[in-house]
Amino acid sequence: MDWVTGLPPGGDKSYNACFVIVYSDIDPKFTSELWTNHHQLFGTKLSFSTAYHPQTDGLAERMIQTLEDMFRRFCAYGLEFKDYDGFTHDWCTLLPALELVYKTSINASTNQTPAVLEKGWNSRLP
């Protein structure tokens, strides 16, 4: 998806971005009347790609590969971890930390973090 960021928050939502182009394979979820009407209403564009198309698959495949590598390293130590104080943490409590690491890591191709691209600002780190 391509995003426009920096928009003022609307209503009770805290979102300040909206997508303008959605790239998808020809999935019935995106070709339904609901999505067609949605894109007409908001003036967004739905672009379909074919399978194994390098211009559209490359970014998604690279992101998936990065996430797989992170999960592999994360799971290599087992599903329970002990921190410095001896407290045991399981998968559910550590998954948000993994998400934070991913969203605050600078992407080499965009020179931005996913948090900046998604929200317009970096997440605050301890």
Image (cartoon, helix red, strand yellow):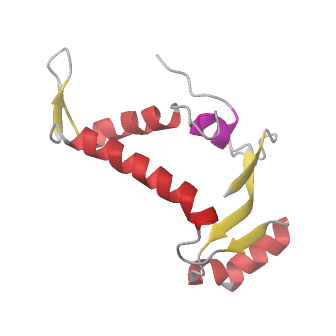
Number of numbered discs visible in the structure rendering: 0
| Quadrant of the rendering where the N terminus is positioned | bottom right
At which x and y percent is residue 50?
A: 60, 78
Magenta highlight on residue 51: no
Along the viewing direction, whichever of 8 and 109 lies nearer the viewer = 109
Displayed quadrant of residue 31: bottom right
90 lies left or right of 34: left
At which x and y percent is residue 45?
A: 78, 68
> Does residue 70 lie above or below 126 as drawn?
below
At which x and y percent is residue 17?
A: 73, 47
Span of residues in magenta: 112-120
Name of the residue lying farthest toward the front: 54
Residue at 38% of width from left, 37% of height from top? 98
7 lies left or right of 122: right
At which x and y percent is residue 122?
A: 61, 28
60 lies left or right of 36: left
> Does residue 108 lie above or below 28 as drawn?
above
Residue at 57% of width from left, 80% of height from top? 27
The overriding secondary structure of the stretch rendered in magenta is: helix
Displayed quadrant of residue 106: top right
Residue at 29% of width from left, 37% of height from top? 93
Residue at 17% of width from left, 23% of height from top? 87
